[in-house]
Image (spheres, rainbow, N blue to C red):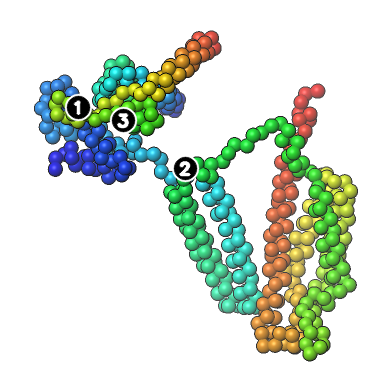
Amino acid sequence: MENNNDHVQNIVLELRRGILAIAVLSQLQEEQYGYSLLKSLSDKGLEIDQGTLYPLLRRLETQGLLNSTWRITDEARPRRYYIISIRGRDALVQLSREWAAITATMEKMIVEDV
Amino acid sequence: MNLLDKYLLEVGKYLPRKHSQDIQAEIRSTLEDMLDDRSRMSGKPVDDTLLSEVLQEYGAPAKVAESYNRPRYLIGPRLYPFFEMVVKIVLTVLVVVSLVGFGINAARSGGAGPEFLASLGSFFAQFFTGLISAFGNIVLVFAILERVLPAGSFEEKEKTWTPADLDAEPDPAEVKRSEPVFAIIFTAIGLVLFNLYPDLVGFSTIKEGVWISVPALSQAFFHYLPWINLLGISTILLEMYLLVKGSWQMTTRLAGLALDIGGIVLAVIMLAGPSLVNLETARMAEVFGESADVLTKLLNGVPYLVLVVLITIQSIEVAQAIWRMVKTPKPLGGFLPR
């Protein structure tokens, strides 16, 4: 039984890893810094480790889907703010369609066959 | 230097140099936000105790840095197939060269006694040293290539496959015409040489206008000649049958196997028996002068080396033939219910 739980947990981790990029892009239509994004995703029910989020933000920026800029805030603290780019918006539209198609397919499979 | 600075310095040691400062700045900003948040929620002041809790939660420096690093390979997946191929080729060459070297040394020592043991010990020592050295050098070269070759080089392009390719795949039972032809020619040459012109197997030279030849084969060899002839003629007949038929069948595979096993048995008997070579020292001195002695000792070891190699290769072939016969899949029709 323990082994089965481990396998299930691994699959759940893979499922969550698969949706992170879409989740992050969807939340950066308004400018946010890393920690605020972390809290925003957590408030909406998606817990994500900072060790996962920050490298993901860098990767998306390298791919041209996000833009970032350093700004000094009111508390005189420099923060890096991220926002979705034009390419990122196009990608999000495509990813949203893909997501809708996948969830519709999975709904059919799970409801009909399980 | 405060605790936060020490933490960031430690993380920085493991980060890629190019983005290290930028990443450290971002981590500092995040940790400061986490501290403010934690202080607000818990009512605790922002001090080293709270900072220690936050750092503990954030994670060990090496682990934090790991998430920013791409996986690093000594030899990555794109070069690994070539590395494997080169290692196999080099190690095979190393084994062959070492065996030849050992054979020559063993022949010089007469095949027995303390000198032979010394050459055996030297063989193993040199072989293993050479093996480790060769492997280390290959790893070093490929590790350098992994780091200097541009991305995209050596990546395997996927071949387009179509069902028509199935026809092109070789039939394991098919006999290529050239194979029995070569086998017949070389076996016939061997039989003619050993039976009709055995004196030609040796050394010949012209000295002061006179032809001097030193036959190599000993009387012991000629005791085995009837068996060599039997195996040779049987081989020629089998190869002629295969040339006509064009494919292997169970009967011909069994016949081939029997001939291979017969060859191995004969080779083992010859190896254990008296020397197959008998080079007359006086005649060798006429041909080779001062180096005749050393050369004679060297050449006396050659038949043993040849027989050992022959036995090894034929044993492998026999094992492969048996494996093939055991593993050959039956046609699908044999399993379907009628």
- Labels 1 and 2: the sequence-earlier one: 1
**Picture residue at 31% right of the left edge, 44% below the top:** B17
**Discs 3, 2: same chain:** no
- Residue A103 appears anywhere in the view: no
Q: Residues within 10 Å of mark 2 (few under 14, many from 20)?
A: few
- Tag 2, which chain? B
- Give me the C-alpha separation between circle 1 and circle 2: 39 Å
Q: Is residue B162 above or below residue B109?
A: above
Closer to the camera in the image, A102 or B99: A102
Secondary structure of residue under mark 1 = helix
Q: Residue at x 53, y 67 (%)?
A: B126
Which residue lies under the disc numbered 3?
A: A54
Looking at the image, which residue is at 55% across and 46% down? B81
Mark 3 surroundings: few (<14), some (14-19) or many (≥20) residues within 10 A: many
Query: Which amino acid lies under the numbered mark 3 shown in the image of this protein?
Result: Tyr
- Front residue of B34/B316: it is B34
Q: Is residue B220 above or below residue B2?
A: below
Q: Nearer the viewer, mark 3 or mark 2?
A: 2
Which amino acid type corresponds to the residue marked 1 in the rendered image?
A: Asp
Counting other residues with Cα less than 10 Å from the Cα at mark 1, is it few (<14), some (14-19), or many (20 or more)? Answer: some
The quarter of the rendered structure image containing the N terminus of chain B is top left
Q: Chain of mark 1?
A: B
Query: What residue is disc 1 on?
Result: B33
Could you say whether the residue bearing mark 2 is in a helix, strand or loop? Answer: loop
> According to the image, label 2 marks what residue?
B151
User: Which element type, helix, strand or loop, lies under badge 3?
Assistant: helix
Place of residue A86 in the rendered image (x, y in percent of width and height, measured from the top left): 37, 22
